[in-house]
Image: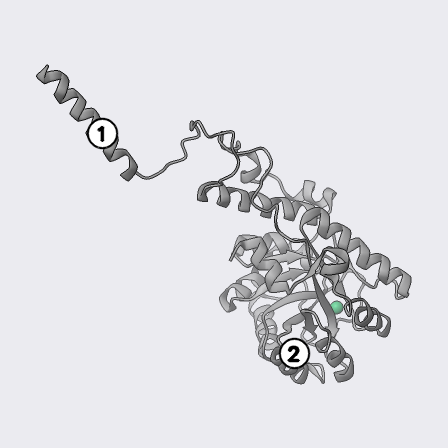
Amino acid sequence: MRIWIAGLLALLLAACSEPDSPAVDSGESGEASTPVVVDEADSAYYDQLRARWLELEHADRAAAAQTLEPEPEILSQPLPESAPITPVIDAAAIPAIAIIIDDVGHSLAQGRRLIALPVPVALAILPHTPAAQRLAEEAGAAGKTVMLHQPMENGAGLSIGPGGLYVGMPRAELEQVLQGNLNSFVPIQGINNHMGSRLTAEREAMDWVMRVLRERGLFFIDSRTTSETQAAFAAEAAGVRHLSRDVFLDNQRTPQAIDAAFNRALVLARRQGSALIIGHPYAQTLDYLEQRLADDLLHSEGVEVVSVEELLARKYRR
Ligand SMILES: [Zn+2]
């Protein structure tokens, strides 16, 4: 009898001590089939997985197949046993687009039309242009994102203007030119490439660029002027927060073509959660944006216009 009571006590003590032990998801829980609560480990797992999916979606499929070897580790990992098959944590996220306008800095009037837009548009300003500093200040004061639009060598031999980075530049020179551009106006929150179909395909040069951005805490947007671009991979390796362009808004400068491109971005955003648009300060583009963004896009299309930083935050989960 005594032994029986002692045994019972021991059992009770053991039961009482259970709640204090940390809740671990062993994958063997009886609640495996209820995808209501996603614990922190699963959440981090899906964040990583989603970031990878986004990257793959954003890259040309052919380019992705070429450049993503060996297969990203995260995709080859088995799903945790307790996880639902479809990630549920992002289901409530509202589809979002972000808009960057490149080649800014030559005209104060054009830049001010962008700053006056009623949504968060980023101004990507060319270095050493007459209105660069003025527009950067005014845009920053108005809460708009300011970026350095960094000229990089293209494959067509087109002039890229002052402050350009070229294939074959020694590292010290490349860094000096880039630092000079980054010091040429304030504020600057991140950069994207102006042209660059030749230079962005050079992994070593991209690694050098990303090292500078990492030190300065800046983000990088790959304009994707070539499917051979190595920029996003270099950014990833250097720990630089980055996104890639999904849609060029105004490759054709007619209202119909611009509208079609904008609508394509909305479709993409609904499909993949977000889309990044790059346009230029052409009169047709400015006219279009002023008109289109005067409406509440969230109300009319169910898509939110957010800043580039917000899109980055969604990717990296602040
Ligand atoms: Zn450009």
SS class, disc 1: helix
Q: Which residue is mark 1?
A: 14
Please state which amino acid type lies under the numbered disc 2. Answer: Ala
Whether residue 30 is situated above or below residue 120 in the rendered picture: above
Q: Position of residue 46 (x, y in %)?
A: 54, 43
Relative depth, front residue between 75 and 168: 75
Q: Quadrant of ligand 1?
A: bottom right
> Around disc 2, counting alpha carbons within 10 Å, would you say few (fewer than 14), some (14 to 19), or many (20 or more)?
many
* Tag shown at residue 139: 2
Relative depth, front residue between 31 and 218: 31
Q: Quadrant of the N terminus?
A: top left
Q: CA distance from mark 2 to mark 1?
A: 63 Å
Q: Position of residue 135 (x, y in %)?
A: 68, 81
Residue 167 shows up from this direction: yes
Name the residue at 68% across, 44% down: 64
Please state which amino acid type lies under the numbered disc 1. Answer: Ala
